[in-house]
Image: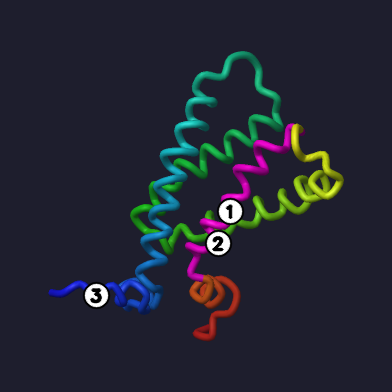
Amino acid sequence: MTFSPKAIFQPADRYEGVRPINIYLLRLLYILMFFVLGKETWTHVLTHQGPWDPIDAVAWCIWTAFATLAVLGIIRPLKMLPIVLLEIFYKILWLILVAYPLWSKGTLTGSPAEGITSEFLWVILPIVAVPWGYAFVTYIYNPKK
């Protein structure tokens, strides 16, 4: 069995026609979600003291669930693709609705939104990792049905 670097860029039957590079990038993304986001969210949730603000609690619970479900994505990257699509959508939406107006007015720097903006700009990683052809055929246009 020989290794061909070109093979990771070719569609593979093993992964439902998705290129192995996308599978590896998705797994990397899920690993980062689980360890980086999971450490922050579980630490915050487990060490929180006092009553929760309901809206704040919803956000922390959603992010904690994301991080925890990422374990399934490491094992089955294509089956958990919807959580990556949701991540891309909510981050881009937030960047457009919150960060862009602040940036266009020159008030983003130093605002409470600056830190989140810096983190959400990394949305480029899941955008690159997603096998968009597979996502389109699987979730939008399925010619088999």
Relative to residue 59, is residue 90 depicted above or below? below
Q: Is mark 1 on a helix, strand or loop?
A: helix
* Segment colored magenta: 111-131
The rendered magenta stretch, by its main secondary structure, is classed as helix
User: Farthest residue in the top direction?
Assistant: 50
Distance Cα–Cα, label 3 vs label 1: 30 Å
| Image quarter in which the N terminus is found | bottom left
Relative to residue 102, is residue 142 depicted above or below? below
Q: What is the three-letter code of the residue carrying label 3? A: Ser
The residue tagged 2 is: 127
The numbered disc on residue 136 is: none
Instruction: Determine whether, in the image, residue 65 is placed left or right of residue 113.
Output: left
The residue tagged 3 is: 4
Percent x, y of residue 24: 36, 61
Q: What is the three-letter code of the residue carrying label 2? A: Ile
Which quadrant holds residue 49?
A: top right
Q: Going from the N terminus, do you reach mark 3 or mark 1 first?
A: 3
Tag 2–tag 1 contact (CB < 8 Å): yes
User: Farthest residue in the bottom direction?
Assistant: 143
Distance Cα–Cα, label 3 vs label 2: 25 Å
Q: Is mark 3 on a helix, strand or loop?
A: loop
Distance Cα–Cα, label 2 vs label 1: 6 Å
The residue tagged 1 is: 123
Q: What is the three-letter code of the residue carrying label 1? A: Val
Identity of the residue drawn at 53% across and 77% down: 137
Percent x, y of residue 59: 64, 36
Q: Residues within 10 Å of mark 1 (few under 14, many from 20)?
A: some
